[in-house]
């Protein structure tokens, strides 16, 4: 069944509100929003809302991360401006800004190449339920290994361009549903010796260009092809996504100050195994 087929306007608003809730919670927790937005509506019998609609709902997450880190972003922009005009790249803000720029290049390039040269990406095996299940389990094991082996001596004041590029390269794998953009960058950061809280903070800041790219590339197409009937409920989903994204960011940063990411390891293992068990049902819908 099509996601919006044969249902009332209020029901469609409720569906997008709920998917905004799912997007908001899973975008910044290391559990893959793309995987959940594909699996959850199928489990509920709603059908797949489509890649473009899911990408547009990420704009809510973009607004949330911009609002949450607004003071940080202003400091980074000031640091970069002074570095460019005065040639002094020694401040933590300018080095962090440079790391974020370098770290954003790989995912932007990957997104452009996929959009330009892989027209069948949305229906490829990489986005299938079996792939999501297996990838989720693999990522759980990698996060567990990173938690166990990471030395946790780096923080944001020590960041260099090399750190941004390394974590940015890992972020490219987030084009595969089930990997999780925040999950892969957090895992790479822990392997590279970051403190958990600062690793999450850098991951959120690094996600701004990636989330913006995914949402803005699709927003025009979606609203040109949809009527008010579907357009307004999608806006409800964006607002819902923004609200719950803000709370997810705030909660995770506080959580990682004192606790490990092992709870997400267990969740991802269970999520992947449940998908394998339910795969016949999911594939038939």
Image (tube, rainbow, N blue to C red):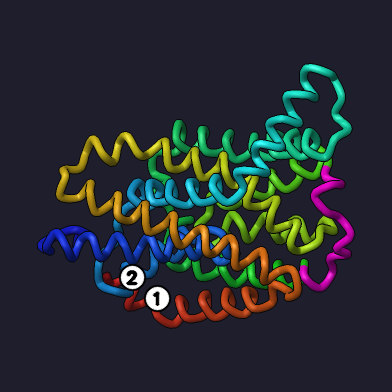
Q: Position of residue 79 (x, y in %)?
A: 76, 31
Q: Is residue 100 left or right of residue 283?
A: right
Q: Nearer the viewer, residue 138 or 49?
A: 49
Q: Position of residue 164 (x, y in %)?
A: 75, 42
Query: Circle 1 is placed at which residue position?
Result: 279
Magenta-colored stretch includes residue 154:
yes
Residue 283: mark in rendering: 2
Q: Position of residue 145 (x, y in %)?
A: 77, 70
How far is the residue under mark 2 from the one under mark 1? 6 Å
Magenta-colored stretch includes residue 277:
no
Q: Is residue 129 left or right of residue 7?
A: right
> Dot 2: few (<14), some (14–19), or many (≥20) neighbours within 10 Å?
few
Which residue is depicted at the point 36% across and 52% down? 238
> What residue range appears in magenta?
147-159
Q: On the rendered image, what quadrant is the N terminus found in?
A: bottom left
Q: Could you tell me which secondary element the residue under label 2 belongs to?
A: helix
Q: Name the residue at the top extreme.
A: 85
Which residue is depicted at the point 70% across and 39% down? 100
Q: Could you tell me which secondary element the residue under label 1 belongs to?
A: helix
């Amino acid at each position: 069944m099509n996601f919006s087929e044969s249902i009332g306007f209020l029901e469609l608003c409720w569906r997008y509100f709920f998917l905004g809730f799912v997007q908001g919670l899973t975008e910044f927790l290391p559990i893959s929003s793309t995987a959940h937005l594909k699996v959850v509506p199928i489990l509920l019998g709603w059908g797949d809302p489509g890649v473009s609609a899911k990408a547009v709902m990420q704009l809510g997450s973009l607004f949330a991360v911009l609002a949450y880190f607004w003071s940080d972003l202003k400091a980074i922009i000031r640091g970069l401006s002074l570095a460019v005009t005065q040639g002094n790249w020694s401040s933590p803000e300018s080095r962090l800004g440079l790391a974020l720029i370098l770290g954003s290049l790989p995912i932007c390039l990957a997104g452009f190449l996929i959009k330009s040269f892989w027209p069948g990406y949305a229906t490829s095996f990489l986005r299938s339920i079996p792939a999501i299940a297996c990838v989720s389990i693999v990522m759980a094991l990698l996060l567990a290994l990173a938690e166990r082996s990471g030395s946790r001596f780096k923080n944001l004041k020590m960041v260099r361009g090399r750190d941004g590029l390394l974590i940015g390269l890992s972020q490219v794998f987030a084009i595969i549903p089930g990997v999780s953009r925040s999950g892969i960058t957090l895992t790479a950061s822990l392997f590279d010796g970051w403190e958990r809280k600062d690793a999450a903070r850098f991951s959120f800041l690094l996600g701004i260009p990636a989330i913006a790219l995914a949402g803005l590339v699709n927003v025009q197409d979606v609203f040109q092809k949809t009527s008010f009937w579907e357009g307004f409920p999608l806006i409800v989903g964006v607002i819902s996504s923004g609200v719950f994204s803000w709370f997810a960011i705030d909660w995770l940063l506080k959580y990682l100050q004192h606790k490990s990411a092992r709870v997400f390891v267990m969740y991802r293992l269970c999520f992947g195994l449940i998908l394998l068990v339910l795969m016949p049902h999911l594939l038939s819908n």
